[in-house]
Amino acid sequence: MQQRHESKWPLRRCLVTNIMKILLTNDDGIAAPGLHALFLALKEAGHGVTVAAPTFENSAISHAITVHDPIFVDEYEISGHGKIGWSIKGHPADCVKLALEALLSEPPEIVVSGINNGSNTGLDTVYSGTVSAAMEASMHNVPAIAFSLASKSRQADYTIAAEIALNIVGEYEKFNLPAGTMLNVNIPAASKEQIKGMRVTELGNTAYDNIFAPRHDLRGRTYYWIGGSLAVNSAGKLNLDKDTEAVSDGWITLTPLKYDLTDYDVLAKMKKMLFPNK
């Protein structure tokens, strides 16, 4: 019988007993409401939170770093909280790398990325700046979680997602993830009553019906706008072991990810084929 990796998550503001030093980042930009909601939830729970986030939106920038331009860093304040960290004119991976290696006087106990506007599931994780910021932390052997809300609305309410994120951060040690592995969390844009619980999932298959719309500038040069929408799953039955399908069905998904892209099965076969006597 296949094991069901699911749990009813306590959707309430928990009493966090393990107070941590947290580095908070994102890819939507330092002024994004998802980051501010998570900052306030973590601070209210008593965590020490320092922010290092991009000055401007860096969605779908993946794991890019800035190597041919200067990276400008400015102190950032929130009314009522004073200086909370740095606004960085760079990419999400730049922010984490710079914070860990140059800006912080001591390392954080965990890096938290988000809350992203829109889900980061399946193949979207490859392009995600939110996930890549957390991945950069795991490359430094610092525990890391990326949080995303499955809503593309600019008026999205992050209150429930921030409560869920707070619970998961507070319980992080129980997951016992090895060094080099981060946790990718996607949260349905739904009420507490509509959220079914939590599942541990693998990456699903994200497919888009892409549109490449050609345009011409005033000099006659061709350029393109890339657009499109998610392809509709016509297979029928949902596979709730996939993050793409579970979050769409109302589940919070937890997916462990690591930066080691080696295909070990193929590696072993290639060694056996090329060096059969070893």
Image (cartoon, grey):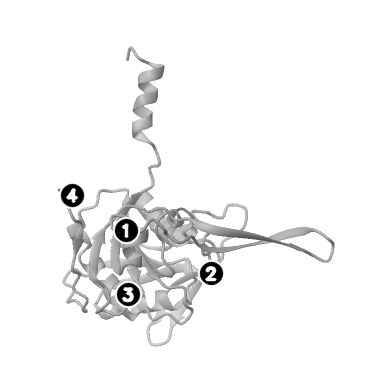
Residue at x-position 54% and y-position 62%: 90
Q: Quadrant of residue 11?
A: bottom left
Which mark sits nearer the N-terminus, 3 or 2? Answer: 2
Can you see residue 222?
yes
Residue toward you, 165 or 133: 165
Can you see residue 107?
no
Which mark sits nearer the N-terminus, 3 or 4? Answer: 4
Q: Is residue 15 above or below residue 225?
A: below
Residue at x-position 46% and y-position 59%: 128
Nearest-to-viewer mark from 2 and 1:
1
* Image coordinates for residue 36, horizontal then vertical, percent: 40, 78
Instruction: Answer with left or right where residue 120 lies relative to residue 73.
Output: left
* Image coordinates for residue 272, horizontal then vertical, percent: 35, 20
Q: Mark 3: few, some, or many residues within 10 Å (few <14, many ≥20)?
A: many
Residue type at mark 3 is Ala
Nearest-to-viewer mark from 3 and 1:
1
Disc 3 on helix, strand or loop? helix
- Mark 1 highlights which residue? 237
Which mark sits nearer the N-terminus, 2 or 4? Answer: 4
- Mark 3 highlights which residue? 161
Q: Quadrant of residue 194?
A: bottom left
> Dividing the image into 4 quarters, which one contains the C terminus?
top left
Nearest-to-viewer mark from 3 and 4:
4
Q: Which mark is residue 57?
A: 2
Q: Which mark is residue 2?
A: 4
Residue toward you, 161 or 137: 161
